[in-house]
Amino acid sequence: MIFDDLMLDPLLLKAVKKQGFVYPTPVQQHAIPALLEGKDVLACAATGTGKTAAFVLPIMQGFIDTPPRQHLPRVLILAPTRDLAIQIHRVVEQLGYGLSLHPVIVTGGLSPAKQIEYLEQDCDIITATPGRLLQLVTENDIDLSSVELVIVDEADRMLDMGQGPDVLHLMAALDGGFQTGLFSATLQGGGITVFAEEILKEPEHIQIHASNKQAETITQQVYLADSFNHKNKLLEEILKQKYCDRALVFCNKIERANVLTEWLQSRNISAQVLHGEFRQSDRMEKTRKFKQGKIKVMVATDVAARGLDIEDVSHVINYDLPYRGDLYIHRIGRTARAEKEGLAISLVEIHELKNLERIEYHLDTRLPTFKLPGLEPQLRRDKKGNAKPKKKPNKDKPRYVSKADREKAKSG
């Protein structure tokens, strides 16, 4: 199948071609027709499979089929984080180029007064985070009476962040009769199934990749580390390999990410840090430099695990293993974007083996272990995955003494 087979307007096909896409991904093949038919959609697809275009293209087609008259918002797109909302807004602008639409983004971290100003002018599409939008709705600063389609993106992440009640309040504030699309990387945990039942009506179920299936284009590797210093040496060696063009390195905590970035810079490695304590403008500037190749290594917390869409990330490196399998999948999904190949590496100390076991259980497979010449670990895993440090000589054990030496000792 090619995009022409989806019966999209020539303007959209031109926009798609401009983005370099020829063949729709599986989630696009199923979600686009369903949304165009006016059905509610529950779509589960792994990160990096083209979910954003799967709902943006039908939105654009809807405006072509029925051009806006009063420029009140007809489409509402909800995203869990500012970063993802900004990324979606960018895709809306790219695929809607030439359609004279007026998309507006509403998130925390941006001026509420400025957002209200944009909303009071022409506005066709709102991309928002639930908290800020609910604030505007509560204060009667926005009119959502004309909304015909609501898209809830990364629904599993929203529930993890406790945003479910805000979404339900927003849906209750809308007039009835609107269409809904719910997109998620997983249907496991967090009450996602119950949540979907509350906001969807007889939805079309689309499940492209189960949540425990990693992308086929991602090569996954594990390197065991004996200590903090050993892990640093492994990371430095990997980053300096000639085929490591652009790397995203994940840490679990902000303090850890800051310290690691400073250490990498001290080793003359081009690195910057990205986490939630930066201002939005600073995060956008760092992301822009990373995309342009001005920064080779981005050290990030999970704030960048979703919403950071960069096609040419060659390596995703888990400096710290995440605590859950679904977070691991979201992280490694930052590489091998747009059907390209990528490498996902996890550096694992002995205290992280439990996390590795959880991830492997989630994936239903054991990840292969590799070694770097000269940096081989003492730590190893047995066939069952248990930690087995290499045996060291026992200094307390008496050494073997030959018969001749014994006789000599007696005569002496």
Image: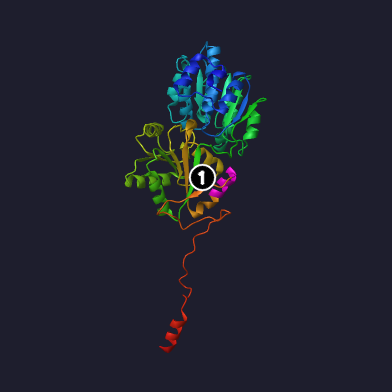
Residue 325 at x, y = what percent? 56, 43
Question: Which residue is the extreme one toward the front?
Answer: 404
The reply to whether the magenta stretch includes residue 363 is yes
- Screen quadrant of the C terminus: bottom left
- Residue 146: name its quadrant: top right
The reply to whether the magenta stretch includes residue 90 is no
Question: Which residue is the extreme one toward the bottom?
Answer: 411
Q: Is residue 375 visible?
A: yes
Q: Which residue is mark 1?
A: 322
Residue 267 at x, y = what percent? 33, 47
- Screen quadrant of the N terminus: top right
Task: Give 45 or 157, whichever is nearer the viewer.
Answer: 45
Vertical side of 174 occupied by 308: above or below: below
Counting labels gives: 1
Question: Which residue is the extreme one toward the right?
Answer: 202
Task: Give 341 or 277, whichever is nearer the viewer.
Answer: 341
Q: Secondary structure at mark 1?
A: loop
Q: Is residue 262 left or right of residue 327?
A: left
Vertical side of 399 occupied by 149: above or below: above
Q: Is residue 19 left or right of residue 216?
A: left
| Residue in view at x 50 percent, y 55 percent | 350
- Residue 282: name its quadrant: top left
Q: Is residue 123 visible?
A: no
Residue 35 at x, y = what percent? 60, 21
Label 1, residues with CA under 10 Å away: few <14, some 14-19, many ≥20: many
Range drawn in magenta: 356-364
Residue 218 at x, y = what percent? 50, 38
* Amino acid tagged 1: Pro
Vertical side of 206 occupied by 251: above or below: below
- Residue 297: name its quadrant: top left
Magenta portion: prevailing SS class: helix
